[in-house]
Image (spheres, rainbow, N blue to C red):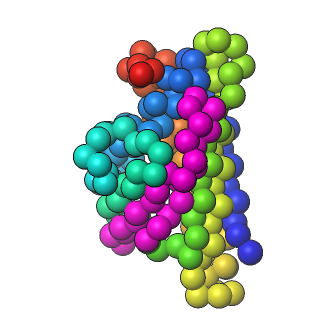
Amino acid sequence: MPVVIEVVTVIDAPPAVVFDLELDVDVHAASLAGSGETATTSTGRRRLGPDDEVTFHARHLGRSWRMTSRITAHERPHRFVDEQTRGPFRTLHHEHLFEALTAQRTRMTDRMSITAPAGPLGAAVAHLLLAPHLRRLLRERAAHVKHAAEAGDGHPS
């Protein structure tokens, strides 16, 4: 059974700005600098688009991790989805939603669903260890994106 993690953040910036920041791999890496996160795209572009793949390298929970995800849905500026194609999870589906509250205010929702390998033991680890860790990472990332968007560091294209 999948574990679902949801983080909601209200940002004083238009949805297109927030959407673009969320797809910028340099913003992603900066938001998780404490884990030494790096990101390499399949295209060489720094902003992801439909069907692009990105490989992340980082150190989490005392281990080095490598995960590759693909953008499987891209509906600018409302929604995109990335899904693990290779990595530590049995499945990882991450939906990013951007709802305009006003022209200059966005509700950003991160909804991540994971399943771990290793049957019942993996499910227990996912619930007890991975979900709280991932929730913290999503909150850190959202706070970073909020700060960048509200400081005017993002520009819709």
Residue farthest to the front?
Answer: 51
Q: Which residue occupies 35% across, 59% down?
A: 55
Q: Residue at x 70, y 60 (%)?
A: 4
Quadrant of the drawing holding the N terminus: bottom right
Front in this rendered view, residue 151 or 109? 109
The dominant secondary structure in magenta is strand
Based on the displayed image, in which of its 4 quarters is residue 63 positioned? bottom left
Q: Residue furthest left?
A: 44
Q: Quadrant of the C terminus?
A: top left
Name the residue rendered at 67%, 55% in the picture: 5
Q: Is residue 103 visible?
A: yes
Instruction: Say which quarter of the image contains residue 27.
Output: top left
Residue 117 sits above or below residue 26 on the image:
below
Question: Between 23 and 62, which is closer to the camera in this rendering?
Answer: 23
Q: Considering only vertical position in the picture, is 30 above or below 84? A: above
Q: Please name whichever residue, 134 or 38, is drawn nearer the observer in this view of the structure.
A: 38
Examine the structure image and report whether residue 124 is included in the region drawn in magenta.
no
Check if residue 62 falls in the magenta segment: yes
Specify whether residue 143 is in view.
no
Position of residue 135 measured from the top left corner of the image (x, y, whole percent): 59, 53
Bounds of the magenta segment: 61-86
Vertical comparison of 81 with 58: above or below? above
Residue 142 relative to residue 68: left or right: right
